[in-house]
Image: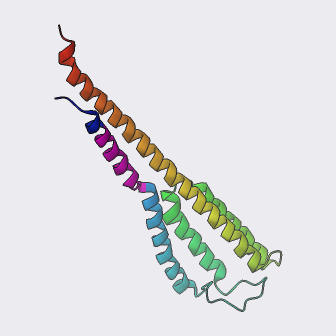
Amino acid sequence: MAISPRDIIGVLMLTVWTVACAETTAPRDIVLGRQQVDAYLDQCTARYGYNPETSSGLGPHSLGAGEREWRECVYEAVEKFLIPKSLSPEVYRKAIAEDRQMTAAIASGKMTRSQRRERMQKLIEEIRRVEEANSAKLQQQALDRTWKEEVQRLQDITRRTLAPLTRP
């Protein structure tokens, strides 16, 4: 059976399209982890009575009632649902450690709530960039692996197809 260049191109294009459209498991796991954290946050709010979205009126150096406990509950959610699914757990651990330090600094009057919020926004952006880079890396690795496998498969087919022609 002869393979035409058109067949080879068709198979390669199908392979590239399939891999490009396929989701890798890590980014999907991170999305699921974020959904689980969101659900857990509701439990933290119910358990400790603190909600950062409705806690206006606090002074710049004041912690809300139940805030420290609420934040510890959030850290627990991140440790339980995101860190195990991430290729870069250190960025989450860094954010948790910094948030603990900043919360203590607010309570001691060394930092304001708005300073912490600004820093946390930067840390969250850093996490987003790292996770996006991880996703792109995984997708490229999957594409490279599939490409190599497909090239090998086509070379094997070509060898088998041409083998009868090399016999005396």
Residue appearing at x 42%, y 45% in the figure: 142
The span shown in magenta is 9-25
Outermost residue, top side: 168
Left or right? Give the position of 137 relative to 57: left
Image quadrant assignment for residue 57: bottom right
Residue appearing at x 64%, y 61% in the figure: 126
- Quadrant of the frame with the C terminus: top left
- In the rendering, at what x and y percent does residue 19 appear? 37, 49
34 shown above or below 165: below
Image quadrant assignment for residue 165: top left
Report the front residue among 9 and 147. 9
- Quadrant of the frame with the N terminus: top left
Examine the structure image and report whether residue 45 is included in the region drawn in magenta. no
Query: Which secondary structure type mostly characterizes the magenta part of the structure?
Result: helix
Residue appearing at x 29%, y 34% in the figure: 5
Query: Is any part of residue 32 visible from this angle?
Result: yes
- In the rendering, at what x and y percent does residue 164 appear? 17, 17
Examine the structure image and report whether residue 16 is included in the region drawn in magenta. yes
